[in-house]
Amino acid sequence: MSFVIFLCCIILGVKAGINEIVDLHHEEISSIESNKIFSRTFNFLQNLENEVIEDYIESISNKYDFLSKKNKTNLDWWQTGIIYEIYPRSFMDSTGNGVGDLRGIIEKIPYLKYLGISAVWLTPIYPSPGRDMGYDITNYRGIDELMGTMEDFDELMEKLHESGIKVILDIVPNHTSDEHEWFVKSVQSIEPYTDYYIWADAKYVNGTRQVPNNWESVFGNSMWEWNETRQKYYLHQFLKQQPDLNFWNPLVREEIKDMMRFWLDKGVDGFRFDAVEHLYERQDLLDAPILDNGQLQTINYTQGLDEVYYEVYDWRSLLEEYKKKDDQTRFMVTESYVELKYLMKYYGNETNLGAHFPFNVCLLGLPHRSAKEFLEMLTEWMSNLPSGAWSNWVVRIIV
């Protein structure tokens, strides 16, 4: 749910630059800020002769086959270009109402082309009450009137494509707004929407109504909200205005795929899937154990169930169906904050393709660490990367 500046690049590494980081490890660096470490390293990179860089890249290409010169011509568009994130509401206001819009992005296409980017990733542009910056959606197939119309979107996509820029949309499959038609009808038990969301009966202790279990939302409060109309609790892993969809219901799974088809048929080139680790919750609603650190266990309770990965593989299969039609890759990236061993499962395998890559958030926020810790994080990621998988690095920059 957080916003990041997505740096779509691969850290190739340069011998002199790496040696500089190692040298820093032998100094007392507790008072050196992280940005100084990176600044010194990249100063070394900028001063290196091109042939030195080429020689070092070639020296490590035997370990990472995708770096080999012979494979460079086989790289896909998402591997060779820059993906530029746009939060439309703050990018360019074309009307003077103080809110960025699609026509504002259209006006800036020459600028985007000048930057040399290959694709734009648009954060949610769908109708929304705006309680969570557009991530609470009331209609997956519409455009928020603050940002324009569907005609504006069609024009934007057409002109971006004419400029050689692909379009990636944010998709929020885990939850909707409580103002979404599906939830309104689910509250009223109108079929087929009755079980589109997670509903549970209350527990009663000495005549007092209690929540179904001890699960906590991402924000620390109970994951359950009472609904007077239906006389049940509904589950929300985020805000109470963002009820979770019930992915155990095959109708819900098909709704999400139909929504993907809607945008793919319009010519969208890929998706960034938000908060995917939260798609499934265990059906028996057992209380989560309390860990040694006092936190509730989430894996296999409210996050990281195996069904999450199967869902991602199914989405990738859908994208591959479109690729078969014109040999053009439809790209997908997943957002998840689970431990590394669970994160790597999003890549899939030879039998079941997964995301082209999951966001790698090990550097998120760039907290002050020693050079040794940075090296350990980078090494852990690269060591666990599946064979042939593509890496990435996500950094949040606060300005």
Image: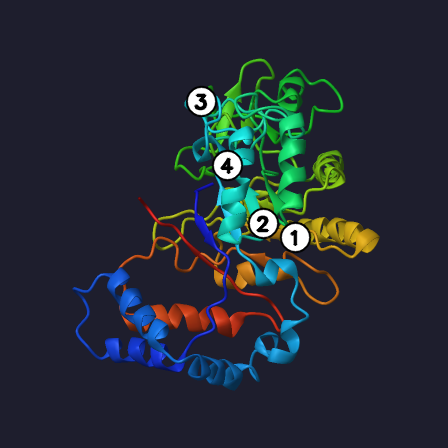
The x, y position of residue 103, in whole percent, is: 55, 29
336 up-or-down from 263: above or below = below
Front label number (4 vs 1)? 1
Report the disc number at residue 237: 4
Spatial CA distance of label 2 from label 4 is: 31 Å
Q: Looking at the picture, tell me which residue is in the foreground, 86 or 339.
A: 86
Report the disc number at residue 119: 2
Taking the spot 69% from the left edge, 40% from the top edge, the residue there is 248
Front label number (3 vs 4)? 4
Amino acid beneath label 4: Gln
Q: Is residue 137 left or right of residue 370?
A: right
Residue under pointer 3 = 206
Work out whether residue 346 can be spotted: no
Q: Earlier in the sequence, mark 3 or mark 4?
A: 3
Spatial CA distance of label 3 from label 4 is: 28 Å
193 up-or-down from 309: above or below = above
> In the rendered image, which quarter contains the C terminus?
top left
Taking the spot 54% from the left edge, 52% from the top edge, the residue there is 117
Circle 2/circle 1 CB separation < 8 Å: yes
Q: Earlier in the sequence, mark 3 or mark 2?
A: 2
Q: Is residue 76 left or right of residue 228?
A: right
Amino acid beneath label 2: Ala
Q: Looking at the picture, tell me which residue is in the foreground, 327 or 364.
A: 327
Report the disc number at residue 331: 1
